[in-house]
Image: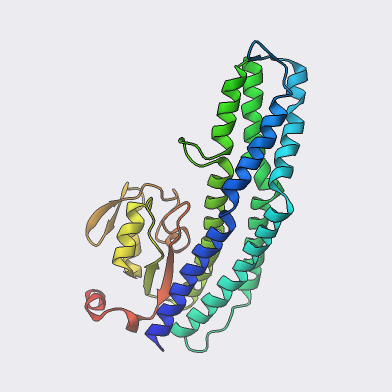
Amino acid sequence: MSFQKSQSLLNQLNELIDSSVDSFNEHIPSAQKDIFNRVQLLLKDLDVRRGEIRPTIKNLRKINRLKREIQNAILNDKYLKSVGAFRDSFTKVTQLQTEYFATIEKGFELPAFVEQLKQSSVTAMTEGLTAAGIKANITEKAADIVRRNISEGARFGELLTEMRTFLTKTEAGAGALTRYAHVFTTDALNTYAAEYNQVVSEDLNSQWFQYTGALVDDSRDFCEALVKKRWIHISEFDTITNPGKPNAIINGKSVSKAGLKPNTNPITFRTLRGGWNCGHLVSPTNEEFVPRNIRKKFE
């Protein structure tokens, strides 16, 4: 079994996931500007007196049209084509992972359950990035902003400012669609790969793992420490997740667990990893690939 080939496939896997997420999200900022421009035109139809929005039933009824406009603005042909391309990434991830597992287990073949796992993951991803997910996370929240401003008789300029801040990139941060889509796509693809890792590593009774993936500007302390550590023995899952405590123990040092999901424990660590929006994987590896000086500590 070739360590070089194994590492090459693992690197390709991480790069594929990152590039798939980036490719889907690269056009979102410009789409947000278009959404805001269309919303702004609709908001100008509100009944306003002396700069203040009138709290009337007539104004409130216009919210339904606003919601339809936002849904249609996001779910256009270009966006849906991107969802289709992102869907194909699940198949590519499956192929790379299966090739990788063949480098650590002779004769490894794609398990039958993986196709079902992939289909359920793709279905959840599609629902989250299309009508249901967009409605819950973008459309309804935008409608709530308008509804509140109408009910309070707010100034029209304040409504526009709040809507611009919500829908587009400003000094306050990224727009709503950017925030939602980036976290959702990152979690969808990485969680699928992590679940494949979890089941196979349990089936193989793997004892050694690698924590892999790129670090970014806002990477959590937890992920930074584990990427630096890289090689993990299964017996370390207890101290790494350290259930019930605010900090993990990694290489004997206390590291914040901020950002980890509440149910992260030694059993779920391989799937949940560093929490929401985590772009890292806990991949099983061959004991012979682990540096000797590290292996000796657990013999």
Is 104 left, or right, of 298 in this rendering?
Answer: right
**How many labels sit on residues?**
0
User: Quick one: quadrant of the N terminus?
Assistant: bottom left
2 or 109: which is nearer to us?
2
Work out whether residue 295 can be spotted: yes
At a point 49% along the width and 76% down the height, the residue shown is 203
Residue 213, compared with residue 286, is above or below; it is above
Residue 229, percent from left and from top: 29, 66
Is 271 left, or right, of 166 in this rendering?
Answer: left
Work out whether residue 239 can be spotted: no
226 or 134: which is nearer to us?
134
The single residue placed furthest to the top in the displayed view is 50
Is 5 left, or right, of 79 in this rendering?
Answer: left
Please tell me in which quadrant of the rendered image residue 233 appears: bottom left
At a point 63% along the width and 14% down the height, the residue shown is 51
157 or 114: which is nearer to us?
157
Residue 102, percent from left and from top: 49, 84
At a point 53% along the width and 59% down the height, the residue shown is 22
Residue 201, percent from left and from top: 46, 73
User: Quick one: quadrant of the C terminus?
Assistant: bottom left
37 or 90: which is nearer to us?
37
Please tell me in which quadrant of the rendered image residue 87 appears: bottom right
At a point 44% along the width and 65% down the height, the residue shown is 281
Residue 192, percent from left and from top: 55, 64
